[in-house]
Image: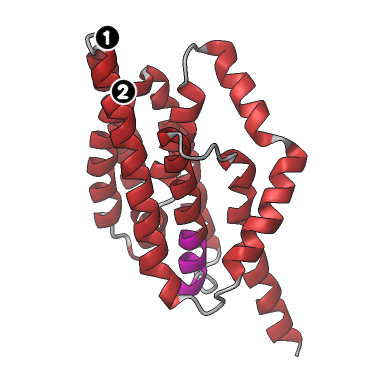
Amino acid sequence: MLGTIFNTMMIIIGSAVGSIFKKGIRDEYHSILMQAMGLVAMGLGINAIVQHLPSSKYPVLFIVSLAVGGLLGQMLNLETKFNTLVNKYSKGNLAEGLSTAILLFCIGTLSILGPVEAALKGDYTYLLANGMLDGITSIVLASTFGIGIAVSGIVLFVWQGSIYLIALLMENSINNDLLNEVTIVGGILILASGLSILGIKKCNTLNLLPSLMIPPIVFIIIDLVNVYL
């Protein structure tokens, strides 16, 4: 868990530094930073999709995941509940920035593979590299959206900690195919977040978040079928 702790601290420190810069940023600079963050999110999302989709052994799974996950998220109304909660304790567009930060920090190759490598091999290389990248990104995000971005560090700790524990408990069941499918869905969510920030298309990204649970469920079902057939 040392790598995850480092990753979390880098986000919190970066958010604190970025929030200091925010106080002296004029509107035109704030606007260009928003555009930069939107483009970064779109770029990272597209990269994840292009890099992992050709390796998918179930090329329609991401479609099913987004459809089923989106319906579930809409039923739970996650987007509205999240925005209401965040806006209750903050001003401005922190909800949008925080949802983007959570996706950028949690749904990436390094953030997913890092805890797995740490749990199975004791290798913290991915997590340390991810911590440095997230620290820099959090500075830019906090300079745009404020200190509230630090909350994403807590979410990341829970996310990576959960993956770490699951990897320990399911050492023989974790495989690259599952991680690949989760990354594809995550890339699409990050891309959707970028579209929202740029004002191209408002996407209810948080309502699509349950889509990330569908690939693991499908893989569990496949494993059970293979066992009993």
57 on left or right of 33: right
Q: Is residue 97 above or below residue 51?
A: above
Question: Can you identify the residue that label 2 sits on?
Answer: 31
Residue drawn at (29%, 17%) of the image = 19
Q: At label 1, which amino acid type do we have?
A: Lys
Q: Is residue 172 above or below residue 64?
A: below
Residue drawn at (34%, 55%) of the image = 110
Residue drawn at (51%, 40%) of the image = 201
Residue 142 occupies quadrant: top left
Q: Which residues are magenta?
A: 175-184
x then y, percent, for residue 227: 70, 84
How many angstroms separate mark 2 from mark 1 (CA)?
A: 14 Å
x then y, percent, for residue 28: 26, 17
x then y, percent, for residue 80: 66, 28
Question: Can you identify the residue that label 1 sits on?
Answer: 23
Q: Is residue 56 above or below residue 154?
A: below
Secondary structure mostly seen in magenta is helix
**For marks 2 and 1 on the same chain, the one whose residue lies earlier in the sequence:** 1
Q: Residues within 10 Å of mark 1 (few under 14, many from 20)?
A: few
Residue drawn at (49%, 46%) of the image = 192
Mark 1 element type: loop
Work out whether residue 71 or residue 128 is closer to the camera in this orientation and state it. Answer: 71
Q: At label 2, which amino acid type do we have?
A: Ser
x then y, percent, for residue 138: 30, 31
Q: Is residue 77 visible?
A: yes
